[in-house]
Image (spheres, rainbow, N blue to C red):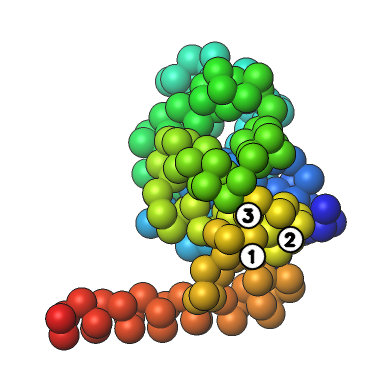
Amino acid sequence: MPAALYFTDSDAANELIARDPLALLIGFALDQQVTVPTAFAGPYKLKQRIGELDARAIASMDPASLEEAFRERPAIHRFPGSMARRVQELCAVVVDEYGGHAERVWTEAESAADLERRIGALPGFGAMKITGLGSVLALRFGVEAAQELVPDHPCLGAIDSPDALAEYQAAKRAYKAARREQLRSA
């Protein structure tokens, strides 16, 4: 297990997402219409505001209280209400399907196809998040079932330093621009 995942400018946030599987999943849930550093700093901010990252506690929180924690300035996400609901839904799935242990999403996967299905069943996890989380699990945590999920384009799993994060973000912008151009030309 890595000591940190270099997805933010905060050492504490980077260490949290590396050591706490629920924090990693929450970061991926928040990785939508915000920068990677903003998304993955979210679990640390949430932990500071509610005291702990526990799937059972978050799943059973009063939704208004959780939303308030997301809205507190600086807001955890640009869409605090919908992301608070998404995180609460994610935690409910972790409780219901995995006994409150987020790491069971990948530690109990029997194959790449099973892992892909498990990740894809999480609220808000589509194809891009499946490959993103898969790449992190394969390249940073050595999860064998995730090896087939690593894409052939720049991915979060390749980030191993702050410089690599900057390179990833530049490559991601270029990749998205090329894809948009491909779609326009088709």
The vertical placement of 6 against 105, above or below, is below
Horizontal and vertical percent position of residue 108: 68, 35
Sequence-earlier tag: 3 or 2? 2
Sequence-earlier tag: 2 or 1? 2
Question: In front of the other: label 1 or label 3?
Answer: 3
Tell me the number on the disc at residue 157: 1
What residue type is disc 1 on? Gly
Residue picked out by circle 2: 140
Answer yes or no: do the residues labelled 2 and 1 have beta carbons within 8 Å? Answer: yes
- Near mark 1 (Cα within 10 A), the count class, few <14, some 14-19 or many ≥20, is many
Nearer to the camera, 6 or 125:
125
Residue picked out by circle 3: 146
For numbered disc 1, what is the local secondary structure?
helix
Question: In front of the other: label 3 or label 2?
Answer: 3
Residue 119 appears in the figure: no
6 with respect to 94 (left or right): right
- Residue at image position (73%, 73%) is 161
113 with respect to 2 (left or right): left
CA distance separating discs 1 and 3: 11 Å
- Residue at image position (16%, 85%) is 185
The vertical placement of 62 against 177, above or below, is above
Sequence-earlier tag: 1 or 3? 3
Nearer to the camera, 22 or 150:
150
What residue type is disc 2 on? Arg
